[in-house]
Structures are given as structure tokens and as C-alpha cells.
């Protein structure tokens, strides 16, 4: 997908459970002033986490290349050829 390294997006930030990471929607990645943030939905509630500038570049490109829209899962499974996202969130049993 656009030459992005697979692990650049799929590894959750330190301290974030994969289940939280897999449930993110495109709308959970948003601008707050000059920087982007991720809204995490965890057992204890919602938390906003600042996004590192390199991750921001990767996510911005990923969203455009994958053609993601508001309301869709941010991290989606790929089709059987590995050439396009399916619209379905990543499976938690990976």
C-alpha cells in the first residue's frame, strides 16, 4: 500500500493495548491546534494522546492512499491480494 512499511502503522504506541488500537476510527485521529491527536477508547474512559510528527506523516499518507473516510475503521484488513483495504476493522485475533 503506497510503499509504507507495514509495521509503521500496525504497532500500537507504548502502553496502548492492541484491542484499543484496532478499534480506532478515522475520526479518532484529529487536529487539535497545530498537532494531531488520537482519541483512545479504553476501559477507563477516553484519552487523547498527542501524535509524534513522524507518525502524523505516516497516518496522513496512509489515510489518503487507502481512501479512508469519516466513520470507517482507521486500521482495516486487506483484501486477499493485499492491494486494498476492505472497510472491516482489523481482527483482534491476529
Image: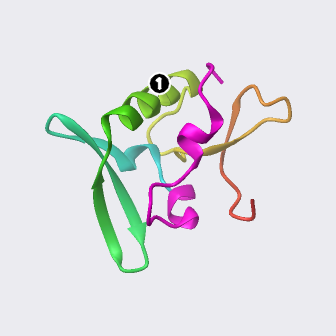
Residue 43: say if magenta.
no
**Residue 23 location in percent, x, y?**
53, 59
**Residue 2 location in percent, x, y?**
61, 19
Label 1 crowding class (10 Å Cα cut-off): few <14, some 14-19, many 20+? some
Position of the N terminus, as image quadrant, is top right
**Residue 3 location in percent, x, y?**
63, 20
Q: Which residue is pictured at 59% across the width and 26% down the height?
A: 4
Residue 17: say if magenta.
yes
Decide: is 92 above or below 53.
below
Residue marked by disc 1: 61
Q: Which residue is pictured at 28% across the width and 58% down the height?
A: 48
Q: Which residue is pictured at 68% across the width and 63% down the height?
A: 92
Position of the C terminus, as image quadrant, is bottom right
- What is the secondary structure assignment of the residue under circle 1? helix
Decide: is 73 above or below 46.
above
Q: Which residues are magenta?
A: 1-23
Decide: is 53 above or below 67.
below
Question: Observer-nearest residue: 12 or 82?
Answer: 12
Question: Observer-nearest residue: 21 or 66?
Answer: 21
Amino acid at each position: 500500500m503506497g510503499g509504507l512499511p507495514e509495521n509503521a502503522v500496525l504497532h500500537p504506541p507504548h502502553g496502548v493495548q492492541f484491542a484499543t488500537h484496532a478499534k480506532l476510527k478515522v475520526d479518532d485521529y484529529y487536529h487539535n491546534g497545530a498537532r494531531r491527536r488520537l482519541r483512545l477508547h479504553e476501559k477507563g474512559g477516553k484519552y487523547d494522546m498527542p501524535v509524534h510528527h513522524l507518525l502524523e506523516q505516516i497516518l496522513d499518507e496512509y489515510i489518503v492512499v487507502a481512501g479512508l473516510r469519516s466513520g470507517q475503521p482507521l486500521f482495516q484488513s486487506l483484501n486477499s491480494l493485499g492491494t486494498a483495504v476492505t472497510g472491516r476493522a482489523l481482527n483482534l485475533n491476529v
